């Protein structure tokens, strides 16, 4: 067993044991939010892998949340159906809009998805009879399987952890498959990939749809965990949060998204009393990371773990020598 | 909508047609009744004039935004916060300390410009050329500035007296004098800005870097200096817009969000990085906004604005006046 495996096992045990060892409902709640946002961050990681930053993911998560809430509230649908529909709607909307949205790239895609996400949120706000306007929808039933209602927070935690783990494993599986190779190729050199007969747009749309599905599932979980949905939870700031988690953790691997969520989600809870200080702290941490840890936590960790200490020292000396010489 | 105007909704949706909640524009959803007591010609002139008055502020905002993108390839999400900073400076100097309005305006604009230069040098310079990272950095700058102002000045809405008040009434068309003052100053600044870009040494250098930074460097232009200059001037324009609008709207830490979004829309309509595009886009958005918010309400106006953005990005992603990528 190498060092990496040991660390992984320790992290896994800590993650599973978290709510049971601490037995504190506040910490458990933080844990649940962490894993819920991990799922959103993972869906963003998929987009970033493709080199496309989507600011519509808040809106897609919102679509999932409202779908689940409406199905359960208005149609008395069973939880499992509503929950799966949340993901399907998120994925379907991405699948339908994808061929239009993904025709543009780079900054234009960012701006277009920004507009798209805001239109979704405007729809939630404006269509009062269906979506309840600014007040949103209240009294969404909790997760339920047959007769078992998920009231216990610790069990909600396990559910969220399971979703995040599935998302993580799914993403790893995609990245290691041929599709993953194609995604990387599209990011690195689209013309070359196309010259090999790859339909770039089709791959992009499929990836966007998978990513939308994950965001929708996160939304479906949100609705039944918080038991209410309001439009302002799904503005483009939700997508920005997911993006920031990826940046903090490191966008190169899905583990980065997980680390980012673990780092970022509990952060506002530290300064619960005053919202302004929360936001300020958030902004300053972000600036610090962008400025000094541009590869994210995972990048830095991986470097420190995989490189023998002696070599790090040598590299540091080399850098110093180079700077002096310059 | 101009107060006392011949067209009005009985529930006035307020400045720009939005209310702001949690820093986001929220169209007010109350039943409204449209009251029009002017003839067709007066009506169209009034709507046009209102549109121009919206548009000129959008142009001020969008110019800085588009210039910063054109030169540094940085999408400046903090642009609305520079607008807010200009308004806050006027609140402090004119509202609290009682200086002359025009003096406060000048100091506010210079201060915001200087602040922009500092921000660019310390935080953005090392990220120029990396679109994703610099975009996130401006987001971080945006929320940091916002929360700092909220901590220092409080999150509530404040207001200052209007330095000019009253209305001009020309053949039944009503124009508030303060909006005329805003329009006149903005127009003068736009002319100066145009002359600066086309005749001044630094202005020419800025355009050179925007066109081809490598070639500009070969001519002895230091890009770093131009980045600072561009960001400073861009922030100044945003700060000016904020300082001009401070007496007209209420001042709060979140006041920059709507103008920011409008700048976004204008710039996409006109073409990212294109300065004539910002002017055309600003006028277009102002007119569309005026027409739709007059006849269909503010929500429809916002929807239409976003719809235009989506349409233009699909048909011609480089914008109305943009160069093809």
Image: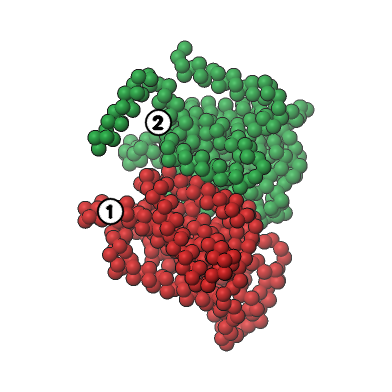
Q: How is the image coloured?
A: by chain
In the image, residue B8 sits, relative to residue A292, either above or below, namely below
Residue reaching furthest to the right: A147
Number of the label disc, if any, that sits on residue A123: none
Q: Which residue is mark 2?
A: A181
Query: Which colour denotes chain B?
Result: red
Instruction: Name the one closer to the observer, B72 or B306.
Output: B72
Q: Which chain is green?
A: A
Q: Which residue is mark 1?
A: B222
Q: Residue at x 69, y 32 (%)?
A: A26
Chain letter of mark 1 equals: B
Which residue does the image show at 35% across and 54% down from the upper left? B227
Secondary element under disc 2, as helix, strand or loop, is helix
For the N terminus of chain B, which image quadrant?
bottom right
- Single out the residue that lies furthest toward the left: B219
Q: Classify 10 Å Cα crowding around label 2: few (below 14), some (14-19), many (20 and above).
A: few
User: Dot 1: few (<14), some (14–19), or many (≥20) neighbours within 10 Å?
Assistant: some
Residue A252, image x, y percentages: 43, 32
Q: Chain of mark 2?
A: A
Q: Nearer the viewer, mark 1 or mark 2?
A: 1
């Amino acid at each position: 067993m190498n060092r990496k495996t040991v660390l992984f096992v320790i992290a896994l045990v800590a993650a599973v044991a978290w709510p049971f060892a601490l037995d504190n409902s506040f910490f458990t709640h933080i844990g649940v939010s962490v894993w819920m946002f991990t799922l959103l961050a993972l869906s963003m990681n998929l987009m970033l892998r493709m080199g496309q930053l989507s600011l519509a993911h808040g809106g897609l998560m919102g679509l999932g949340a409202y779908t689940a809430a409406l199905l359960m509230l208005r149609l008395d649908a069973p939880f499992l159906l509503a929950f799966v529909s949340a993901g399907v709607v998120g994925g379907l909307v991405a699948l339908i809009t994808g061929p239009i949205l993904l025709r543009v790239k780079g900054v234009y895609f960012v701006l277009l998805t920004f507009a798209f996400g805001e239109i979704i949120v405007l729809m939630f706000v404006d269509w009062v009879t269906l979506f309840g306007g600014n007040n949103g929808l209240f009294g969404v039933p909790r997760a339920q399987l047959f007769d078992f209602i998920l009231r216990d927070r610790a069990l909600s935690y396990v559910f969220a952890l399971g979703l995040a783990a599935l998302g993580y494993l799914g993403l790893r599986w995609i990245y290691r498959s041929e599709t993953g190779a194609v995604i990387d190729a599209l990011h690195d050199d689209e013309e070359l990939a196309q010259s090999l007969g790859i339909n770039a747009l089709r791959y992009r749309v499929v990836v966007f749809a998978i990513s939308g599905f994950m965001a929708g599932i996160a939304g479906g979980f949100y609705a039944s965990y918080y038991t209410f949905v309001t439009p302002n939870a799904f503005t483009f700031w939700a997508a920005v949060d997911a993006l920031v988690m990826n940046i903090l953790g490191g966008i190169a691997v899905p583990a980065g998204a997980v680390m980012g969520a673990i780092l970022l989600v509990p952060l506002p809870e530290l300064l619960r009393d005053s919202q302004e200080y929360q936001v300020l702290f958030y902004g300053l941490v972000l600036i610090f990371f962008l400025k000094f840890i541009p590869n994210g936590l995972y990048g830095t960790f991986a470097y420190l773990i995989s490189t023998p200490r002696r070599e790090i020292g040598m590299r540091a000396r080399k850098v110093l020598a180079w700077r002096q010489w310059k | 909508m101009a107060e006392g105007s011949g067209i009005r909704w009985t529930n006035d949706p307020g400045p720009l047609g939005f209310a702001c909640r949690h820093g986001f524009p929220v169209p007010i959803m109350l039943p409204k009744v449209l009251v029009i007591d002017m003839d067709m010609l007066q009506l169209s002139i009034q709507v046009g004039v209102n549109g121009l008055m919206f548009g000129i502020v959008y142009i001020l905002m969008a110019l800085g935004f588009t210039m910063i993108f054109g030169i540094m390839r940085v999408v400046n999400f903090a642009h609305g916060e520079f607008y807010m900073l200009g308004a806050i400076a006027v609140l402090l100097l004119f509202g609290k300390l009682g200086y002359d309005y025009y003096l406060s305006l000048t100091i506010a604009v210079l201060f915001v410009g200087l602040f922009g230069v500092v921000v660019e040098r310390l935080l953005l310079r090392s990220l120029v050329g990396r679109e994703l990272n610099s975009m996130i950095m401006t987001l971080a700058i945006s929320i940091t500035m916002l929360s700092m102002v909220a901590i220092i000045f409080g999150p509530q809405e404040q207001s200052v007296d209007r330095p000019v008040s009253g209305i001009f009434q020309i053949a039944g068309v009503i124009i508030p004098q303060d909006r005329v003052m805003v329009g006149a100053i903005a127009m003068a600044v736009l002319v100066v800005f145009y002359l600066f870009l086309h005749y001044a040494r630094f202005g020419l250098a800025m355009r050179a870097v925007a066109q081809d930074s490598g070639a500009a460097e070969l001519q002895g232009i230091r890009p770093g200096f131009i980045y600072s200059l561009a960001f400073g001037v861009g922030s100044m324009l945003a700060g000016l817009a904020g300082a001009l609008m401070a007496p007209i709207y209420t001042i709060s830490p979140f006041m920059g969000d709507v103008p920011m979004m409008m700048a976004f829309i204008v710039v996409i309509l006109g073409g990212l990085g294109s300065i004539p595009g910002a002017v055309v886009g600003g006028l277009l958005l102002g007119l569309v906004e005026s027409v739709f918010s007059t006849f269909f309400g503010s929500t429809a106006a916002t929807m239409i604005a976003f719809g235009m953005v989506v349409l233009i990005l699909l048909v011609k992603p480089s914008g109305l006046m943009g160069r093809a990528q």
